Amino acid sequence: MIPRNRPVINEADVARRLGVPLATWRRRDAPDFRRRVPSLLPESRYLVYDLAQAEAYIDGKPIPALPAGEHPDDLLTADEAAAILGINPSTIRAYAVQGYLPAGTTVYGARLWPRREVNERRDNPPGQGRGGGRRAGEPQGPRKQHPYEGDPRLRTAADALAAADDAPKGRIAAELAAEHGGTPRTWERLLTAAAALQDGAPGTHP
């Protein structure tokens, strides 16, 4: 997590500020730097550090503490966003591609999502929460053609059906649940809906 979307720096820029080649810096200075200035994305392959902490280290000053507590401007990794939504990190990336989540922002190669956007998705799933209901006296809008209309998992289910040949639906559902989160029963329903869409069943057209 990058707390409160604070400015950050990577190791290449640290070495550049010190005027030494990156390979030399990593061999000579990186172990002590990493011990005193922890990476903000420890579960990621991207080594990103708080700029204020890195500058304090470069200047030989005490390392300032990072702000504590959650904040709407925190930038979250896929793992952190997935923990909030109760799904797998790979599903976070799929949701972002399919528009079920905002695309996020890239910081030194790492894809991150503002906490406010993740919390908004958690608290207001499609058709619920803010803007999702109907005010008294308003005409009722169009009903969903099927329970999973607009759910990006339908595409995942459809792709799994296309690749599974004649594999039992229960086995496909179990594999999807293990990979993307959720229950096998939910994935069975999604597979049924995806199959109906492929077959052009009445009332299930996108």
Image (cartoon, rainbow, N blue to C red):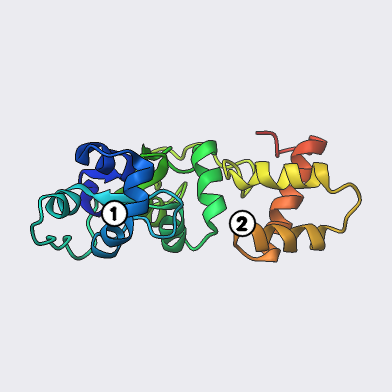
Task: State which quadrant residue 32 falls in.
Answer: bottom left
Q: Give whichever of 131, 44 is nearer the camera.
A: 44
Label 1: which secondary element: loop
Q: Residue at x 46, y 51 (%)?
A: 45
Q: Badge 1: how crowded within 10 Å, few (<14), some, or many (20+)?
A: few
Residue 80 lies, in percent from the top left, at 41, 59
Task: State which quadrant residue 174 falls in.
Answer: bottom right
Tell me, yes or no, whether the two marked residues, 2 and 1, touch with CB atoms within 8 Å: no
Kind of residue at disc 2: His
Residue topped by disc 2: 180
Residue 166 lies, in percent from the top left, at 91, 51
Label 2: which secondary element: helix
Q: Which mark is on residue 29? A: 1
Kind of residue at disc 1: Asp
Query: How far is the residue under mark 2 from the one under mark 1?
Result: 40 Å
Residue ranking furthest to the left: 61
Q: Residue at x 45, y 43 (%)?
A: 101
Q: Which residue is drawn at 70% across and 39% down?
A: 204
Q: Badge 2: how crowded within 10 Å, few (<14), some, or many (20+)?
A: some
Residue 197 lies, in percent from the top left, at 74, 39
Q: Is residue 129 visible?
A: no
Q: How many labels does the image show?
A: 2
- Viewed as shown, does residue 157 lie left or right of 97? right
- Viewed as shown, does residue 177 lie left or right of 81? right
Q: Which residue is drawn at 78% across and 57% down?
A: 172
- Compared to 97, does 48 lie above or below? below
Residue 78 lies, in percent from the top left, at 45, 52
